[in-house]
Image: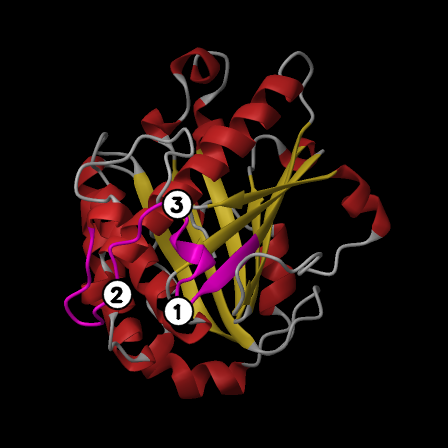
Amino acid sequence: MKIHEYRLVLPCTPEEYHLAQLYMVAKASREETGKDNAQEGIEVLKNEPYETNKFGMPPGQYTEKVFYLGTKIPSYIAALLPESFLTLYEYSWNAFPKCMTVYENKYLGERFYMSVETMHLPDRGGTENANNLGKEDLAKLNVETIDVSDSCDVKMEKGYDPARFKSEKTGRGPFVPGYYKTADPVMTCYKVVRLKFKVPMMQSSIEKWGQSSGMRSPFISFHRKLICWMDEWAGWSIEDIRKYEAETATIVREKLAQGGAGTGAARKSTSRVSSKSSSKSSSKSASKSSSKSKTSSTSKVAVAQNTS
């Protein structure tokens, strides 16, 4: 299993980032679903409060999603795999500033494991072991501090260069390479990614691709957009976010239905991780919050990385 920690330093407060990230996930879902393939995207199955989980986290928000990967997998790899491999399930617990996301593939079962454990802190990326990893994980850990305004060996998409962006609402920017050393406000996302792919002859190449192209590159692209969309999310409240999420779930569901993907396929599978979580969730808390924070337990969504 490969374990990497990506430290993404950003020009905002943790409180701002919490709302910005939720906005970004919803917006990315709208933009990514069906962009390259009508049957490709991310569906949101659940978005509801939880009280406890197996990771010992405090109460927060639980989301369950299905990723229809389509063309996102390299063709030389996709050619070797059955179609069911191209569907990925995501289970996420958001108790900001701590978040935990687990991924599952029904075809691979126990041969595949991927998780993203994140801590958000108001610093410049200098905190060691922010996620309180054990000795065994620390011994395997590779750490990288990422300045998203730099090249990072990831193509800078047109219109999403932090070094060319200045926020009209906040007055922040432009964010040239090295900005995080003096930026105020500033915060860091400490993302620990664990990836296991135990398939003969493919393990090494898939784990390497998964960390670099599957996680690192999308993390960088996602957070460049988060910065450059600052004027869109600045000033939003959690109520604004929940309304936007609900609208997004409907839009994505319609896109996937038009392409023949989504609801039917996802309903056929049951989740090991989800069932454990739902049995512990508080129905009382969920019912009180459903009008504000529940998107549709029967719908599904898709997004760039997720990247909680």
Q: Which residue is mark 3?
A: 148
**Which element type, helix, strand or loop, lies under badge 1?**
loop
Q: Establish if 174 lies above or below 205.
A: below
Which residue is depicted at the point 25% across and 76% down?
236
Q: Establish if 278 lies above or below 158.
A: below
Instruction: Please identify the residue farthest to the front as the structure is shown.
Output: 182
Please state if 103 lies on the left or on the right of 76 as rendered: right
Which residue is depicted at the point 28% across and 50% down?
225
Amino acid on which disc 1 is placed: Asp
**Which element type, helix, strand or loop, lies under badge 3?**
loop
For the residues labelled 1 and 3, the Cα–Cα distance comes to 16 Å
Q: Which residue is mark 2?
A: 172
**Magenta segment:** 165-190
Label drawn at residue 184: 1
| Disc 3 versus disc 2: nearer the observer | 2
Does 186 lie within the magenta span? Answer: yes
Disc 3 vs disc 2: Cβ atoms closer than 8 Å?
no
Q: Main secondary structure of the magenta part?
A: loop
Of residues 278 and 75, the one drawn nearer to the viewer in this rendering: 75
Task: Kindly indicate the quadrant of the structure image that contains residue 47.
Answer: bottom left
Amino acid on which disc 3 is placed: Val
Amino acid on which disc 2 is placed: Arg
Q: Establish if 246 lies above or below 65.
A: below
Neighbourhood count class around disc 1 (C-alpha, 10 Å): few under 14, some 14–19, many 20 upward: few
Which residue is depicted at the point 25% across and 44% down?
161
